[in-house]
Image (cartoon, helix red, strand yellow):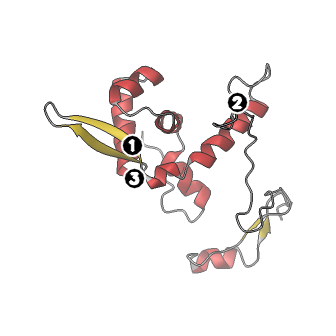
Amino acid sequence: MDRKSFARVECPIARATDEVGDAWSLLILRSAFLGVRSFHAFEERLAAPASTLTRKLRQLCDRGLLLKVQYHARPPRDEYVLSEKGRDLLPVLLALAAWGNRWLAPSGAPLVIVDAATGDAVDPVMCDARTKRPLVLGEIAIAAGPGASGELRGALPRPVVFGAEAR
């Protein structure tokens, strides 16, 4: 049974999870960020069934997150590289890792994020690019944007604060 698609929903969270929200896709992207390029290397690293890996790599390419690039003509051999769209997911994956370390690692973080040059621990924080202020529950809201439909503008006549009580 096919799951419901959120591709046409106006919520960017729904659309983003529709694009990359399953575990296999995120693990493939994590591996690509860590330098994995070939089908065989993905298969080995993830212990994924070949049929699942084939389907997920095709989806990630179709969605523009990975690029399939031929690196050998005879026999034909392809590798998978992150596109700009895929590379833009790095902060999302790092935030997910930090959240997992905080809430899902009762014995301590199994992996930590560190500065590549110094080895010092890094604590990813989402912040506003303009002001550099951290995004904090109760201080951030959503509002209808320039691409919002009339229906969404009517449903969201003023900003709604994350963490506020729904009425």
Other residues around mark 1 within 10 Å, as few (<14) / some (14–19) / many (≥20): many
- What kind of residue is marked 3? Gly
Q: Is residue 132 above or below residue 57?
A: below
Q: Residues within 10 Å of mark 2 (few under 14, many from 20)?
A: some
- 104 shown above or below 63: above
Q: Looking at the image, which is closer to me, 137 or 80?
A: 80
Which amino acid does the dot numbered 2 rest on?
Val
Measure the alpha-carbon separation of dots 1 and 3. 11 Å
Q: Amino acid at mark 1?
A: Val
Q: Which residue is mark 1?
A: 81
What is the C-alpha distance between the residues marked 1 and 2? 24 Å
**Residue 120, image x and y in percent?**
74, 34
Residue at which label 3 appears: 64
Q: Is residue 36 left or right of residue 117?
A: left
Asked which secondary structure carries label 1, the reply is: strand
Q: Residues within 10 Å of mark 3 (few under 14, many from 20)?
A: some
Q: Earlier in the sequence, mark 1 or mark 3?
A: 3
Q: Identify the mark nearer the N-term, 1 or 2.
A: 1
CA distance separating discs 2 and 3: 29 Å
Give the numbered dot on residue 112.
Answer: 2
Disc assigned to residue 23? none
